[in-house]
Amino acid sequence: MQASREDLHANEWRIRYEKGSYWPSLDLLGKYYTRRATFMKEIKWDVTLALSVPLFEGGRTTANMRRAASAYRQSQLMLEELQRQVLHMVGACTAS
């Protein structure tokens, strides 16, 4: 039963992760060079800033969200079924 609860919790976090795909991302990359080509010898480092805006990713993100929500619902139903089975077995053991 504990494994089913953890699976449910993991699927809940998966939904939150997929929601994050709607937001833009910002990446920062810095490089320091010890040796460079002759024409760039004076430049010891550089920095790159990249902004990614998911304009045309909405359909894929929505599909991933629905898939994650479906997996969450399946985990929820499996946990409920397992709880019912345990209650049924406990009831059968006490009736004997």
Image: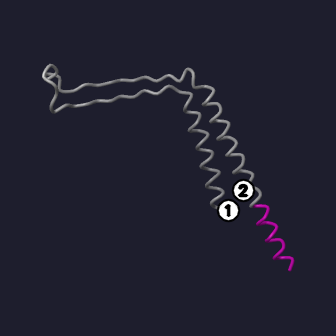
Part of the protein shown in magenta: 83-96
Q: Name the amino acid, label 2.
A: Leu
Q: Secondary structure at mark 1?
A: loop
Check residue 1 in the rendering and tell me which mark sits there, or answer none. Answer: 1
Viewport quadrant of the C terminus: bottom right
* Residue visible at 50% across and 25% down in the picture: 24
- Does the CB distance between marks 1 and 2 fall below 8 Å? yes
Label 2 sits on residue: 79
In the rendered image, residue 66 lying in the magenta stretch gets the answer no
User: Tag 2: Cα neighbours inside 10 Å, few (<14), some, or many (≥20)?
Assistant: some
Which image quarter: residue 35?
Answer: top left
Viewport quadrant of the N terminus: bottom right
Q: Which circle's residue, 1 or 2, is located before the other in the chain?
A: 1
- Residue 86, percent across and down? 76, 66
Q: Name the amino acid, label 1.
A: Met
- Residue 93, percent across and down? 81, 76
- Residue 50, percent across and down? 39, 24
- Residue 46, percent across and down? 25, 25
